[in-house]
Amino acid sequence: MSSDQRNDRGSRQGGQGGGRRFVRARKSCKFCAEKIDYIDYKDARMLSSFVPERGKIQPRRISGTCSTHQRMLAAAIKRGRNAAILPFATD
């Protein structure tokens, strides 16, 4: 692509046009809203909402948790798996 096909900001001209992007409102952390300081690994019902069927831990951008609670959540899920409260994966 030659430089005459780009505008002053470096993006392509023509094509899809518009350039508007959907900006989603930030999700609020469920644990911060409920003022939860410790995530218990024995609470399988709460932890299973953050683990889909394949058994992977949902990332922050999907679950909406803050970084502090995401680290605590990941540790609690791993402890729950080792204690056989949560499955590693389903068949």
Image (tube, helix red, strand yellow):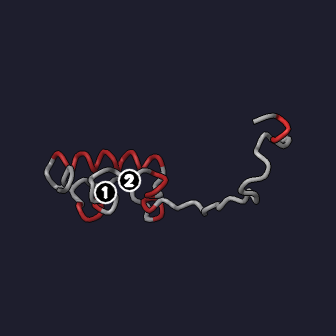
The quarter holding residue 50 reads bottom left
Q: Position of residue 34 (x, y in %)?
A: 43, 65
Q: Are marks 1 and 2 in contact (CB under 8 Å)?
A: yes
- Residue at the spot of label 1: 51
Q: Position of residue 69 (x, y in %)?
A: 42, 50
| Residue visible at 60% across and 62% down in the picture | 24
Closest to the observer, 75 or 38: 75
In the image as oriented, which residue stretches furthest toward the left? 84
Closest to the observer, 6 or 75: 6
Q: Position of residue 91 (x, y in %)?
A: 17, 56
The quarter holding residue 49 reads bottom left
| Residue visible at 64% across and 60% down in the picture | 23
Mark 1 or mark 2: which comes first in sequence? 1
Marks 1/2: CA distance? Answer: 6 Å
Amino acid bearing label 2: Gln
Residue 63 vs residue 50: left or right? Answer: right
Q: Is residue 6 above or below residue 50?
A: above
Which element carries disc 2, helix, strand or loop?
loop
Q: Position of residue 74 (x, y in %)?
A: 33, 47
Mark 2: few, some, or many residues within 10 Å (few <14, many ≥20)? Answer: some
Residue 30 vs residue 17: left or right? Answer: left
In the image as oriented, which residue stretches furthest toward the top? 2
| Residue visible at 44% across and 62% down in the picture | 30
Which element carries disc 1, helix, strand or loop?
loop
Residue 58 got which mark?
2
